[in-house]
Image (tube, rainbow, N blue to C red):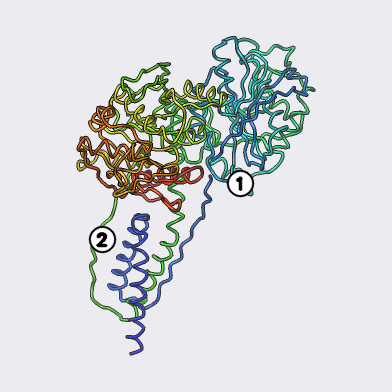
Amino acid sequence: MELKRHAVTLIRGFQRLLSLAIRSLRRCLPSVSICFLLLVVLSLWLTLKNINHKVTLLSSSSVLREPKTNAFNFLEKDFYSQHQILRTKLRTTAACPPKSILLLILVSSNVGNFDRRQLIRKTWGADHSIETKWKTVFLMGKNSNEREMENATDEARIFGDIVQGDYQEHFWNMSYKVAMGFEWAVKYCNFYYVLKADDDVFVNTLGLVDFLAKHTTPLSKFYTGNIMVGSPVLRNGRYGVSPEEYNETVYKPYCSGGGYVLSRDVVEKLLRYFDVLEPLKIDDAYIGILAAKAGVKVTHNEEFRMYEDKCEYKETTLVQHPARGDCAIMLYHRMIGRKSKMHRNEKCLPLALICLLLLVAWTSWMTLNNINEKVILMASSFVYGDSESIFLQRNETVNSLDGEVYSQNPKLRTKLLTTATCPADPLLFLILVSSNVGNFDRRQLIRKTWGADHSIETRWKTVFLVGKNGNQKVMENASVESGIYGDIVQGDYQEHFWNMSFKVAMGFEWAVKHCTFYYLLKGDDDVFVNTLGMVEFLTKQTTPISKLYTGHIMVGSPVLRNGRYGVTPEEYGDTVYKPYCSGGGYILSRDVVETFLSYYDVSKPLKIDDAYIGILARKAEVKVIHNKEFRMYADRCEYRETTLVQHPARGDCAIMLYHRMIGWKSNMYRNG
């Protein structure tokens, strides 16, 4: 009886543990498969050999910390260098967070290299974490191209991440550029380490944060990178240095200028030597000479990979040169894909413990009952390819087209200003985001997260719909923003909640006239769109290619007569609205968009834009379809794999949802 009671207890425990394991099955398929196979092998072994002792298995695990991203502050200021080496005025809009950051990244960039800076902002240079760990700032000079200088001024004002010196851009002036960056950093930033890099490298910022946070990484007297020892001093050509400038035949040991790390105390120490030692044309060699003068030892780190002949991702690499365009994008997405995999493995640790207990329970049960018959269990296994992320190489540049589109629709009675263009090939879906002209931060967050499509074959395009307001500064910034990004359609009417129907109509007309697309997603700037999930939904065979109007359906909504949502009986005589989709986000097939446009002159526009679309749908005999994955009015920020659109989702919430989306997607493709 005692043995039987013990066996029953073990079996019940086994059942409870199995239930817990099943809950984690989808997230941790590899761990479950291994666990199951171990159970099979152990069961067979115990049965065939009649082993009568208990087996205890020990497993070790490592806990990985999640690195996290940053917003920039705007601060226009000039300051004059205190160092003779610079002899110049430094202009900057850059500001550091008030709290100390682990890493400040100073990127040497030519004033004309906007595309390189923008790629860095969109990839490894951006830190979206709640607790900022790094900040990226670009160091520039000036040139004689007036257009480039004007663009650089606008760029500095918009992004707030540029420090510009009043000297000419030239390879031989790189030492001045580095000195300028060091002085600005020490004067205006609280940081532990500086990474000095060029704009044609890839920085594994997540890996670098982990490296610098290790207990083994020195907090002071630290200068590391790809060390150059015994480099000969050339006397001619681009790298030529005369004996008067530097009379030795070989340089002191130094780190290649593509990327190296200095602790703060070393940066401060090198600054003190800038006026003592004549600057050299070769900036990285000059830093090595300063380090020797300051008694700072140079240490080699093999994970700073310079002069690479192929674009290849390695998990341990911290800095890689060269890495431009599509190469940098691929490396970035491999980096964030690897990190999300590591953190998924961390979440599977509880399942590993459950697996361990299952093994012990199963072993004990078989041993106590002394089973002597052979058991054959069939197990299925899963093969996982080393799939790359769904995001892959595309360094899309937006062609600017300063165009004015006059509406053909009497309802609009306005001139549409736009620099936005669509790709030549058809888009799967076009995203039109209603945004207030003053909401730059929201638009920028969308550009950096779900709004961007980095794939080789563009599947979607995001365009923002704005009006105008009485703030001249905001309007000037919007004009510059439109010129830089080429993704804004602006109407010549005032921003107001009651003008939203005009804004949507404006977007529809522009879309039909200038874009080739299969579907249109109309959304607001405070939502999260699972763009990767949307691609899958729209490419399913079950998704209609025509007569589609779907989202979060509103049925029987009462017509309010007062307040913000108030509509007079003269404007709309019914007491309830026709069924419509919530305006936070809904999908229309192209034919429906075209049909709605033809009804704009038939049905008088309504203050409530989403309800107005429902009225147009009824006129056009287009059926409204409810989709539960359009989650409107969510009461908490929670990621769900199947959700297509979620409202509200602003700031840190949208960033978290985006990273969960790309992490889940890369995991799914690896498991596929």
Residue type indicated by callout 1: Ala
Between disc 2 and disc 1, whose residue precedes? 1
Residue 393 visible in this rendered orientation of the protein: no
Label disc, if present, on residue 178 of the rendered structure: none
Residue drawn at x 36%, y 88% is 2
Query: Horizontally, is 183 left or right of 495 in the view?
Result: right
Percent of width and height locating residue 271: 75, 28
* Label 1 SS: helix
Percent of width and height locating residue 454: 39, 31
Residue drawn at x 58%, y 45% is 131
Within the image, what quadrant is residue 503 found in? top left
Q: In front: 553, or 188?
A: 553
Residue drawn at x 29%, y 49% is 555
Q: CA distance from mark 2 to mark 1?
A: 43 Å
Give the residue at the far right of this rendering.
276
Q: In front: 359, or 97?
A: 97
Question: Pointer 2: what residue?
Answer: 379
Within the image, what quadrant is residue 256 found in? top right
Residue type indicated by callout 2: Ala
Q: Does 69 appear above or below 156?
A: below
Percent of width and height locating residue 669: 33, 44
Residue drawn at x 56%, y 26% is 471
Q: Does 366 appear above or below 112?
A: below
Query: Horizontally, is 311 left or right of 430 in the view?
Result: right
Question: Pointer 1: what residue?
Answer: 213
Query: Horizontally, is 1 left or right of 273 in the view?
Result: left
Within the image, what quadrant is residue 406 found in? top left
Percent of width and height locating residue 178: 66, 24
